[in-house]
Image: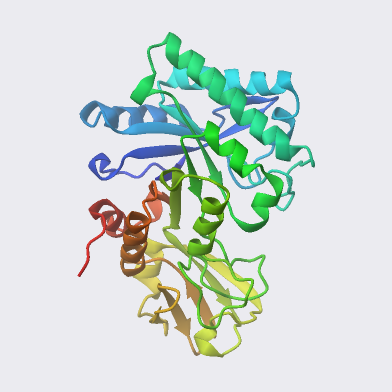
Amino acid sequence: MAYAGGSLPAVIHPEKLTHINFAFAHIQADRAVLDQPGSTADIARLRDLKKTHPRLKILVSVGGWTADGFSDAALTETSRKTFARSVVEMLRQNDLDGVDLDWEYPGQGVAGIKYRPEDKGNFTLLLKTVRSELDAAGKAAKHSGADHYLLTIAAADREYFDHVEMSRLQVYVDWINEMAYDFFNSLTPTTGHHAGLYRSKFAAPTDRTADAAVKQYLAAGVPAEKIVLGVPFYGRAFAGVTAKNNGIDQPYEHFQDFYSYTDLVDKFIGKQGYVRYWDADARVPYLWNETSRSFISYEDPQSLAVKVCYVQAHHLGGVMFWELKLDRDDALLDVIARGCVIH
């Protein structure tokens, strides 16, 4: 799972989790730093969960959307070592189990961050350097073998692969958190299923899906067990949608909002004129409000159950989700924790 700092849920059930990514640390002067207010206290509380559930692993995620500093940190051998050693220091000081690098994205400035063509090769070198420093530190601290420091990345699909050396970099990471969500958002010209497993029958040839993303990773030589499928605990809403096909894959006037699953259940599903439908092709639900011409794409227990079975059938590494506080009484988490259940 992933968790965003500053709003740690009042209740966390560690027995339902294997790993927690504390998000986010950031990069300052080529160094990874915990700069969010309350980070130290939140991490201390997460560490306390391990006292009764020692198999739980706590990682810190560095980066996130609009988080800058990666391109500079990856640029030279000196900057890479500075960054890698700061990661080791951060893990040691906070008694953490590993680090997740969430660079959105190498070689691309869509999030308003600095980028260079050299990011492609430099990202591989950065991961190699971090892996080396983590292994050396782990060996010295007897934090090795099955208990070694973890190194993971959050990654995307499609054009992301044009700017990274996936087949080369994957050897340095324990696994890849594939962000199979936000396929449709405020930056896309039409509505659509933002976390569709497969294609809708109304989909354009260029539409993205979780299944296509997984196949792209496999084609690049990433072992199935290193692919962790990311799922969203939130929905994306579009307004002024063309009233055709219940709003699926249609032009819209403006992006309406981002809604947690809690908000969706409490305020939208079956309320205010929003009707819940199931796309049997894409294997996901959606909401359509005929009166306001509003379309909401989201994940629910039914679609998550399908994805959990998909993960197990394809022998993938597991499921990651963003983020814990967006769930409603563990309704989504429980589906993941339960595993594939064939009815």
Examine the image and state in which quarter residue 128 appears: top right
For the N terminus, which image quadrant?
top left
- Using the image, determine if residue 115 lies above or below residue 333: above
| Residue 64 locus on image (x, y percent) | 58, 43
- Using the image, determine if residue 303 lies above or below residue 204: above
Marks counted in the figure total 0
Please give left or right for residue 75 compared with residue 86 in the image.
right
- Using the image, determine if residue 301 lies above or below residue 82: below
Residue 285 seen = yes
| Residue 225 locus on image (x, y percent) | 41, 44
Q: Identify which residue, 253 or 189, lies in the foreground.
A: 189
Q: Identify which residue, 261 or 164, lies in the foreground.
A: 164
Question: How has the structure been colored for display?
Answer: rainbow
Please give left or right for residue 98 compared with residue 187 in the image.
left
- Using the image, determine if residue 222 lies above or below residue 335: above
| Residue 116 locus on image (x, y percent) | 79, 40
Which residue occupies the extreme right position in the image?
117
Q: Residue at x 51, y 71 (%)?
A: 193
Examine the image and state in which quarter residue 280 appears: bottom left
| Residue 117 locus on image (x, y percent) | 79, 42
Examine the image and state in which quarter residue 165 appears: top right
Which residue occupies the extreme top position in the image?
140
For the C terminus, which image quadrant?
bottom left
Q: Identify which residue, 94 or 262, lies in the foreground.
A: 94
Q: Residue at x 38, y 17 (%)?
A: 143
